[in-house]
Amino acid sequence: MPTPARIHVAHALHEVFGEGGRVPDIWDRDLGEDAQLAQALLGLCLRRWGRLQAWVKPKLKDPDRGVPLGTRVCLAMGLAQLAWLPGVSDHAAVNESVDLAANRDLGFLPHKGLVNALLRKASKDRSALAAELEALPSALDRSPAADRVLKAALAPHVCQEGGAEAELETLWARLQQPPRPDFRLLKGEVPEGLVPEAGLPGCLRLEDGAPFPRPWLESAQGMVQDRSSQALLAYRWERPVARILDACAAPGGKTTTLALRHPGAAITALEVHPKRAARLRQTLQQRGLEAQVIQADAAEWLEGNEGTFDLILLDAPCSGSGTLQKHPEWPWLKHEDLPRLTGLQRRLLAAAADRLAPGGLLIYAVCSWLPEEGAAHREWLREARPEFRPEAVWPASLGVASEAENEATSFFRPHPLQWEGEGFQAFATSRSL
């Protein structure tokens, strides 16, 4: 019988490739020590899915005939273990994949023999299998959506003619490496194993081989926060800030940073989902921070209120295309809701602009590289609301070189090959007094 770790991985792959859905954040919650194997195996299958399928196809009697998803999942899991997980025995990699093929929900029983034959043959020379798989083109592992995102990520920064394709491959290779978490100290002392991240004051990274600092995080002395989020909130702003709005606040990392940066300010944090709003309240309480958490649809709340704020952070719902490294399933998802998302972003931006006090700062951000989710909204605001003007609140190194002014920028758009954080784009604007 397959182990729970492999069953969890198979379920996650069916969710992605069968339903076009994301891998749930808590998909491995109940696995205990087996979570590490499950995470490694799922990551390999998602990041190498195209080449795993390409390796199998010519070995079939009828390569042009469709293969059931259950068969493809079982073969991908078995091949990934044989090729890239040396700690997994031949017996476990082959037999548990064969058992999965016999599972009515996760496999395809008529292909149990096929799965057994292909994996047993592959297990005879695991090094050769790995070499064959690695020799296949990396483009096999990318969907058209992924290619579009990579081009969008590089477009503002590519200067040399003919260099775009090479940079695209370099960026894709970087995004295939498992992400490294970043941390932020909230109080007390930095625990052993965390060291400063070069180039970003206050950002911490885990030393190689150091244990994950779970007790430190659970004690609310620190938090996990991607370096892009940390850099985004290290904006330079000298005007007084008495009232702050965090328009899409959960899970609470940015709300926490705002509270620490502006300790005397009254903070309103909006979150539409009841469970996430409750978790946000709990998180802030554990960290000893105060904010008025309101469970409400941000657009409706903004449009229905008359109050103004000196600082508004609008980290808008988006495609998440900048999180390819953290979410390797992204290339394979259905991306049919982009028009809905961009419409919602425009609505939120317009409503937030109405709630910004004269002289106040509005920061709009998305974890996306697609221009229609960021740069296009910036251009719209410039034309539609002439009383707003760009504010260069970030170092020029975090923006596009052509837009820098006095070593600062109002457009947060780090070069994806020079910056290891998530793919964010943001702009800062103020309302005339």
Image (spheres, grey):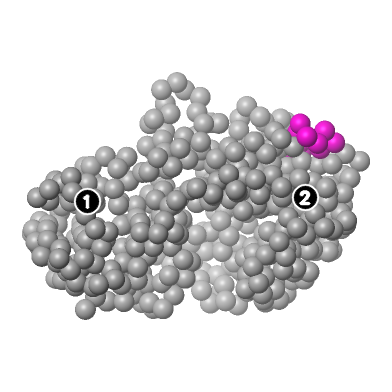
Using the numbered discs, state the Cα–Cα distance from disc 1 to disc 2 in whole angstroms: 50 Å
Q: Out of 294 and 235, give the one closest to the viewer.
A: 294
Chain-order first, disc 1 or disc 2:
1
- Say which quarter of the image contains residue 230: bottom right
Measured as percent of width and height from the top left, residue 380 is found at 71, 35
- Say which quarter of the image contains residue 186: bottom right
Dot 1 surroundings within 10 Å: few (below 14), some, or many (20 or more)?
A: few
Residue type for callout 2: Ala
Residue shown at the point (39%, 62%) measured from the top left: 15
Q: Out of 193 and 38, give the one closest to the viewer.
A: 38
Q: Which mark is residue 352?
A: 2
**Vertically, is 208 above or below 277?**
above
Q: Is residue 103 left or right of residue 192?
A: left
**Vertically, is 155 above or below 316?**
above
What element does badge 2 sit on?
Answer: helix
Residue type for callout 1: Gly
The reply to whether the magenta stretch includes residue 372 is: no
Q: Which mark is residue 66?
A: 1
**Residue 425 visible, this orientation:** no
Residue shown at the point (15%, 46%) measured from the top left: 63
Dot 2 surroundings within 10 Å: few (below 14), some, or many (20 or more)?
A: many
Residue shown at the point (60%, 38%) measured from the top left: 372
For the residues labelled 1 and 2, say whether their Cβ atoms are less than 8 Å apart.
no
Q: Give the extent of the magenta segment.
A: 382-392
Residue shown at the point (85%, 36%) measured from the top left: 387
Quadrant housing the C terminus: top right
Measured as percent of width and height from the top left, residue 323 is found at 50, 51
**Residue 107 visible, this orientation:** yes
Measured as percent of width and height from the top left, residue 201 is found at 63, 52
Q: Is residue 243 left or right of residue 334?
A: right
What element does badge 1 sit on?
Answer: loop
